[in-house]
C-alpha cells in the first residue's frame, strides 16, 4: 500500500503542468493545505480531535462548448495526508492517527462565470473566473497510529468523500467530509470519519 502512495505521488509531479487549467477547462496539478477534525469512532471513550492536512491533486475537467470554455464536469484524483489526535479524558491517554487517502472525485459545475475587470488608471483589464463545484466519490486509505488499547487496527480501508469547492481563478476553498465504509478496528461498528476546510492553488 505504501508503494502505491509513493508511485502516485511521483505521477502527480511528473505530469505536465498547464497554467490556469481550472479557468480554461483543461487538466491541471495543484496543492492544498488546511485544517481537519475527525476520529476513529467507537473506541473506548476516546474523543476525536483535529490537526491539519495536506494534499496533491490532479484534475481532468471537460470544458463547456461556450461561455469561454468553462469546466462543466470531470474528475479529480488526490493524494491526501490527514493528521488527527484522539484523547481519553478519563485516563488522560491519547494517541495520534495519520491517514493517507486516495479519493477519486466526480465533480459537477454548480455555477460558474467570467467577469471582466478594468483598472481605470492603467486602462488595462482582465477576466476573473469564479466557479462552484459539487463533488463526491470513493476512496482508499491507509491508517498509521500508535494506539495500543482500541483493539486490532485494520490499516487499510475503503470509504467515500463528498463536499464543495469554490474557485477564484487558480485558487480554491474546499469543504469536505469523509468516512470509511469498512471497520477500522476489531470492533465491527468502528469507523473513521472526519471533515476538513482547505485552501488550494492550481499551477
Image: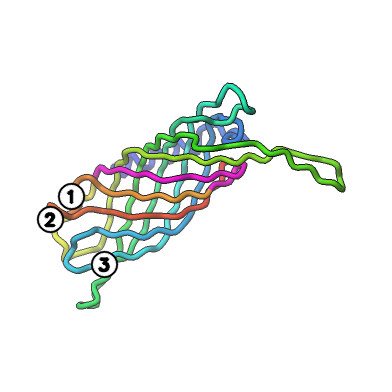
Q: Quadrant of residue 39?
A: bottom left
First in sequence, mark 3 or 2: give its number. 3
Cα–Cα span, label 2 and label 1 = 7 Å
Question: Which secondary structure dominates the residues rendered in magenta?
Answer: strand
Mark 2 touches mark 1? (CB < 8 Å): yes
Residue at mark 3: 47
> Taking 194 as reference, is 78 left or right?
right
- Taking the spot 18% from the left edge, 55% from the top edge, the residue there is 190
Quadrant of the image containing the C terminus:
top right
Residue that numbered label 2 is attached to:
187
Residue sitting nearer the eye, 32 or 175: 175
Q: Nearer the viewer, residue 107 or 99?
A: 107
Q: Position of residue 129 (x, y in %)?
A: 63, 39
Q: What span is colored magenta in the figure?
A: 157-172
Residue 182 horizontal side relative to residue 22, left or right: left
Badge 3 density bin: few <14, some 14–19, many ≥20, Cα 10 Å: some
Q: CA distance from mark 3 to mark 2?
A: 16 Å
As helix, strand or loop, the secondary structure at mark 3 comes to loop
Q: Magenta span has 163?
A: yes
| Residue, disc 1 | 183
Residue 114: x %, y % from top left:
65, 36
| Residue drawn at point x = 55 percent, y = 25 percent | 64
Amino acid at each position: 500500500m505504501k508503494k502505491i502512495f509513493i508511485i502516485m505521488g511521483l505521477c502527480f509531479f511528473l505530469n505536465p503542468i498547464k497554467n490556469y487549467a481550472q479557468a480554461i477547462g483543461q487538466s491541471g496539478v495543484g496543492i492544498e493545505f488546511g485544517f481537519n477534525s475527525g476520529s476513529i469512532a467507537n473506541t473506548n471513550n476516546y474523543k476525536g480531535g483535529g490537526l491539519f492536512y495536506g494534499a496533491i491533486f490532479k484534475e481532468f475537467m471537460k470544458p463547456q462548448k461556450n461561455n469561454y470554455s468553462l469546466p462543466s464536469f470531470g474528475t479529480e484524483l488526490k493524494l491526501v495526508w490527514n493528521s488527527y489526535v484522539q484523547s481519553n479524558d478519563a485516563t488522560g491517554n491519547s494517541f495520534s492517527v495519520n491517514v493517507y487517502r486516495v479519493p477519486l472525485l466526480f465533480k459537477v459545475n454548480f455555477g460558474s462565470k467570467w467577469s471582466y475587470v478594468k483598472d481605470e488608471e492603467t486602462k488595462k483589464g482582465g477576466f476573473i473566473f469564479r466557479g462552484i463545484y459539487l463533488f463526491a466519490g470513493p476512496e482508499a486509505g491507509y491508517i498509521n497510529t500508535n494506539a495500543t488499547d482500541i483493539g486490532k487496527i485494520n490499516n487499510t480501508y475503503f470509504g467515500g468523500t463528498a463536499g464543495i469547492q469554490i474557485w477564484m481563478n487558480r485558487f480554491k476553498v474546499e469543504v469536505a467530509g469523509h468516512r470509511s465504509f469498512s471497520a477500522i478496528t476489531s470492533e465491527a461498528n468502528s469507523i473513521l470519519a472526519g471533515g476538513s476546510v482547505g485552501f488550494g492553488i492550481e499551477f
